[in-house]
Amino acid sequence: MHTTTMTRVTSLIGATLLGLTTLQASAAPEIPPIPAVQGDVVQAEGDFKIKFSIGTTQSGAQYRGLEYFEKIVEQRSDGHIQVELFHSAQLGDDLQAVSNLQSGTLEMTAPSTSPLVGMFPEFAVFDLPFLFPTPEVADTVLDGEIGQKMLDDASRQGLVAIGWAENGYRQLTNSATPVTSPDDLDGLKIRTMQNDIHLDIWRTLGANPTPMSFAELFTALEQGVVDGQENPWITIEASKFIEVQDYASETNHVYTPFITLVSERFWNRLPAGYQQLVRDAAKQMGDYEREVSRTLNDQIKQQLKQSGMQITELTPEQVEVFQEKLAPVYDDWRDEIGGELIDAIRKASQ
Ligand code: TK8
């Protein structure tokens, strides 16, 4: 008796496991391959090392972009510039990494713009809710005059700003309840980035927001210090928030860019040819990272659903309720940000 039932049981387990892994495997996102390096080898004096550190994990779209940056810079400098990549805030969270650039202990980072609003108030425009109707409008603004002026203006305080990449549209997750309207947020403790507009957004919606570094977020969710958080699907998946969050609502409430920064001390040591190489590589990294981010966005959402996250896709009417409730946020911040800049960005979406 024993043997036959044992074999049947083991084959049953085998089959189930196989089923699961194939489902996971079949659901595995198709990541656009890292492109070939374009452009010739740059001749310049000296050997250099770039430590490039970010706050998101190794399995996110952002790290993928960094791998392309590394490939371009090492190939086109014929190995005279070596790039070492760090992820998951290994060399500091967004704010710490920026201050490491200023002190010259780190060469490059690419934080979200939101935690930097204290240093660069003009970045606050990106935190206004529902400002960018589509990623393409965000590209038009970031790759256009407005984006270039922001990079030039942000090249101060020991930093050189050389490019943009995509963090993406933010989605709400929480461990307590499905959210289809602001009423469902009553009293929910929501972690936000260290940014006054985000605090204003969640207070205005009726939640109880707490500003916190991304590096502390997983533990805070795990320990119930906060009930929820908001980030793009890719970051939700790559940070394994599904382990501590049961519900998600596709709010798309804010589009957050990443900004590519270099330590000015390091930049001034680089010969002009290598400065241009790093600038070109940052542009190509940003474009590729956007492609990865947009290719993965919906795939990852489906995968999270398959893995058991209860995702609420809001109807246009339900989104409108959030938009109307958040309209006062524009009044609160228009003067501080500058009506002209807001109107210019709004115009770009017409
Ligand atoms: C990663 C952060 C993250 C951001 C946040 O360092 O803090 O929630 O969305 O991507 O920049």
Image (tube, rainbow, N blue to C red):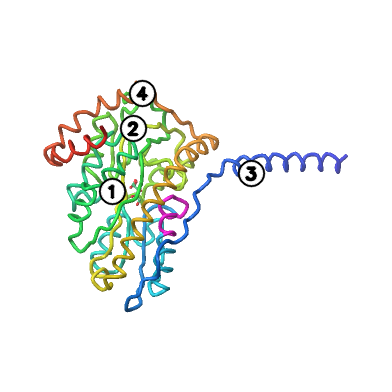
- Considering every residue shown, the one lying at the far left of the view is 335
- Considering every residue shown, the one lying at the far front of the view is 40
Residue type beneath disc 1: Asp
**Distance between the alpha carbons at the discs numbered 3 and 1:** 41 Å
Residue behind mark 2: 188
Could you say whether the residue bearing mark 1 is in a helix, strand or loop? loop
Location of the N terminus (image quadrant): top right
**Distance between the alpha carbons at the discs numbered 2 and 3:** 35 Å
Q: Nearer the viewer, residue 81 or 181?
A: 81
- Considering every residue shown, the one lying at the far top of the view is 317
Q: Which region is colored magenta? A: 58-68
Q: Which of pointers 3 and 4 lies earlier in the amino acid sequence?
A: 3
Q: Which of pointers 2 and 3 lies earlier in the amino acid sequence?
A: 3
Q: Which of pointers 4 and 2 lies earlier in the amino acid sequence?
A: 2
Residue behind mark 3: 21
Residue 143, numbered label: 1
Could you say whether the residue bearing mark 2 is in a helix, strand or loop? loop
Q: Main secondary structure of the magenta part?
A: helix
Residue type beneath disc 4: Pro
Residue type beneath disc 2: Leu
166 over 319 or under it: above or below: below
Residue behind mark 4: 316
